[in-house]
Amino acid sequence: MSLTILLVEDNEMNREILSRRLVKRGYLVHVALDGQAALAMASDLMPDIILMDLNLPVLDGWEATRRLKSDPATARIPVMCLTAHAMVGDRDRGMSAGCDEYGTKPMSFEQILATIQRLTGT
């Protein structure tokens, strides 16, 4: 059984490249374009992991992660933030929002895979 990933990314190029590479590795990938859609999809899908951009329209990734982690139904889903926010304090802010891991773009695909495997225990 393949893992289900919810990829939350509003940048079309980033979304297409990462989604395609994950599917090639056997993952089932669902995509949300904003934080609000991610909340609804996470509740419906109960994915094995969420890859969350932080700079999102409608509801940003910081708040979407806070809401996911405060809801008992989705709190246990690992959230890996993938973001361009690389300033001092951004990692702490992401972890405080509930991210289980904080990756800054560009991040190698191998690093992403290793983090997915570590967070999901696969």
Image: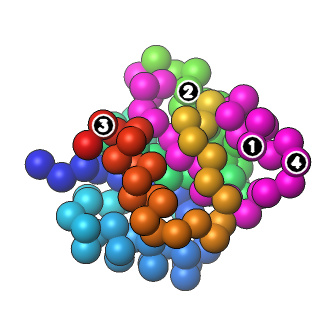
Residue 63, image x and y in percent?
70, 38
**What is the CA distance from the residue labelled 3 to the residue labelled 4?**
30 Å
The type of residue carrying mark 3 is: Gly
Residue at position x 34%, y 47% from top?
117
Q: Which residue is mark 3?
A: 121
Q: Is residue 57 visible?
A: no
SS of the residue under disc 3: loop
Give 9 or 22, whichever is nearer the viewer: 22
The type of residue carrying mark 2 is: Lys
Residue 59, image x and y in percent?
69, 48
**What is the CA distance from the residue labelled 4 to the residue labelled 1?**
7 Å
Residue at position x 43%, y 25% from top?
76
- Give the mark, 1 or 3, whose residue is nearer the N terminus: 1
- Give the mark, 2 or 3, whose residue is nearer the N terminus: 2
- Give the mark, 4 or 2, whose residue is nearer the N terminus: 2
Residue 91: mark in rendering: 1
Q: Which residue is mark 4?
A: 88
Span shown in magenta: 73-97
Contact, CB < 8 Å: mark 4 with mark 1?
no
- Pick out the residue farthest to the top: 72
Residue at position x 79%, y 57% from top?
86
Q: Which residue is mark 2?
A: 69
Where is 61 relative to 18, above or below?
A: above
Question: Which one is closest to the eye, mark 2 or mark 1?
Answer: 1
SS of the residue under disc 4: loop
